[in-house]
Image (cartoon, grey):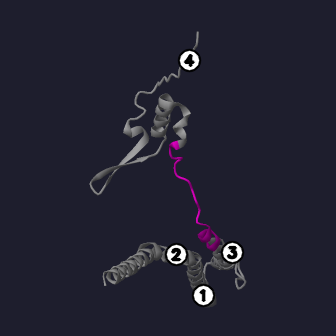
Amino acid sequence: MAFSAVTALIAADSDILADRYWVNLQDFFGQQQATPFSDNGALFANLVGTLAGGDDLIGLRGRGASLRPFEMVDDMQRRAEAQYRRTEQELQKHLDETQKKLTDLRAGNGDDAKGAGRAVLTAEQEAAIGGFQKDIVATRAKLRGVQLELRRDIDRLESVLRLLDIVAVPAVLAVLAIVLGVARRRRRARARA
């Protein structure tokens, strides 16, 4: 007497494939687009595959999204960060020192203050406060400039790659097709003559 293995599936959740439990539906130019946020669909497909033909069919199914980093962009980003991080730290330190001096001067604890907690500021102290405020604004602008420079090389590479993908490759293929067409036409003309 031979026994065969039986594969059984017991599901306790009857709404496992209801859209609201595993996909986000979005309207995309008048069409409904489903974006999965959980793997209920993959689970169901794997179960059907296992019940229908064993584990042989599971190897054919896609593995999902894989992250393949763009190494050139990552290297550029690391170099740019190393180059600009030092400048950014120096500017941040200068900004912190300037803000501390400004706070001390406003509180009456500056070097020129003779009485603690003085309520009236001298003209020199007001000029120093104005200078510190201008310095803070200028330092923040430099800091934003450094942060902008941090992304500039990466954005430039991205623009070049987009230009290559969108314009250059199709243009090269079009020129190649034209050259091959002209060469074929000339060959046919020589063959007829």
Q: Is residue 177 located in the magenta-colored stretch of the structure?
A: no
- Compared across the picture, whether 86 is left or right of 14 comes to right
- The magenta region covers 60-76
- Cα distance between the residues tagged 4 and 2: 61 Å
Q: Nearer the viewer, residue 53 or 92?
A: 53
Q: Residues within 10 Å of mark 3 (few under 14, many from 20)?
A: few
- Residue 111 place in picture, x, y as percent: 73, 83
Q: Residues within 10 Å of mark 4 (few under 14, many from 20)?
A: few
Q: Earlier in the sequence, mark 3 or mark 2?
A: 3
Please identify the residue farthest to the left as the structure is shown: 30
Query: Foreground mark, 4 or 2?
Result: 4
Query: Foreground mark, 3 or 1?
Result: 3
Amino acid of disc 3: Ala
Choose top left, top right, bottom left or bottom right for residue 96: bottom right
Task: List the residue tagged with mark 2.
Answer: 155
Q: Secondary structure at mark 2?
A: helix
Residue 4, labelled with which disc? 4
Q: Earlier in the sequence, mark 4 or mark 2?
A: 4
Q: Secondary structure at mark 4?
A: loop
The image shows residue 123, relative to residue 38, as above or below, that is below
Amino acid of disc 1: Gly
Residue positioned 57% across, 79% down in the render:
149
For the residues labelled 4 and 2, say whether their Cβ atoms are less than 8 Å apart. no
- Residue 14 place in picture, x, y as percent: 41, 27
- Cα distance between the residues tagged 3 and 1: 31 Å
- Cα distance between the residues tagged 3 and 2: 17 Å
Q: Secondary structure at mark 3?
A: helix
Q: Earlier in the sequence, mark 3 or mark 1?
A: 3
Task: List the residue tagged with mark 1.
Answer: 131
